[in-house]
Image (cartoon, helix red, strand yellow):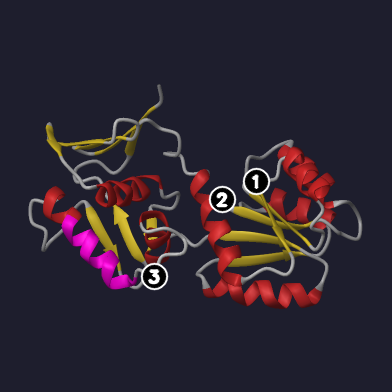
Amino acid sequence: MKKLRILVVEDEPGIVRVLEPTISAAGATVKVAWDGREAVTHLKDAEYDLVLCDLGLPDMDGKELVGKIREGSDIPIIVLSASGAEEDRIRALDAGADDFVGKPFSAGELLARIRAAVRRRSPTRGAQKVRFGELEIDMERRRVVLQGEEIRLSAREHSLLRLLAQSSDGVATHREIIEEVWGPDARAETQSVRVLVGQLRQKLEEDPSSPRIVRTEPGIGYRLSAPRTAAAELTYE
C-alpha cells in the first residue's frame, strides 16, 4: 500500500505534537511547514497527497496560502481553524479548500475527513464506468458485468465494490469500508467486513479461496485488482 504523504502547515507546536502522531499512526507520512512560505517550498520540492492548513499563519493568511496552492495544484486541502465563524469557513472554501475542520477536533473526525478528501481525488472518482480486466462496474446504473455476464449484487456488496474501485491508492481500509457501507456511526466490526468481502468473492471469484480480484492487504484492508490487465479503464459520459 502506498503511504499517503501529508503536508501539515501549522505554527503552533502543541497542535503539531497532536497531529504528527495521530496521522502517522494511521499509516501516513507527515511533513511540517511552520509558515506559508515554507509550505510553498515543500510543495515545489516534493509530491504530497493532501495539505492540512491552519488559517492563522505567521507570514500570511491561511486563505491566501490556499489560493496560492490552487494556482497550480488540485491537491486536497483541509483547513484547520479555531474560528467557528461561518464567514471564515466560506472564505476558505471559496479560496479553494476542500474541507474545514474546527479546533479542537477529534482524531477520528480528522482522519475520516482526510480519507474522504483523498478518495474524492481518486482518478476513478466521477467515472460512470470502471473496468478492471474482465470486470466492468457501471456506477450510475449499479450494474456489474464479469466476463460478459451480469452479476447481481446486494446494496452492501455494490457499495463495497464501488469503494474498492474508487480508492485513490488502490486500497480500502477496514474503517473506510465500515463508514462507506454501514455509515460513519455504525457499530460494525472488522468481522462484518470479512463476511461481506467473502460474500462478494463468492460472486466474483472463480476460486473464492484464492481470490484474484478482491485481494487482501494484511492488517490494512482490501484491494481491487484486474485479473488480466493491471490498469483500470475509465469511461466518463
Residue under label 1, please give it: 98
Left or right of 14: which side holds 51? left
Residue sitting at 91 percent across and 56 percent down?
59
Residue range corresponding to the magenta coloring = 189-199
Q: Quadrant of residue 229?
A: top left
Amino acid type, mark 3 = Arg
Contact flag, marks 2 and 1 (Cβ < 8 Å):
yes
Residue 216 position, x and y percent, is: 27, 63
Measure the C-alpha gap from mark 3 to mark 2. 23 Å
Residue 117's tag is: 2
Q: Residue furthest left?
A: 207
Amino acid type, mark 2 = Ala
Contact flag, marks 3 and 1 (Cβ < 8 Å):
no
Name the quarter where the N terminus is drawn.
bottom left
Residue 187's tag is: 3
Left or right of 138: which side holds 109? right
Measure the C-alpha gap from mark 2 to mark 1. 7 Å
Helix, strand or loop status at disc 3: loop
What crowding class fits label 2: few (fewer than 14 Cα within 10 Å), some (14-19), or many (20 or more)? some
Residue sitting at 56 percent across and 64 percent down?
111
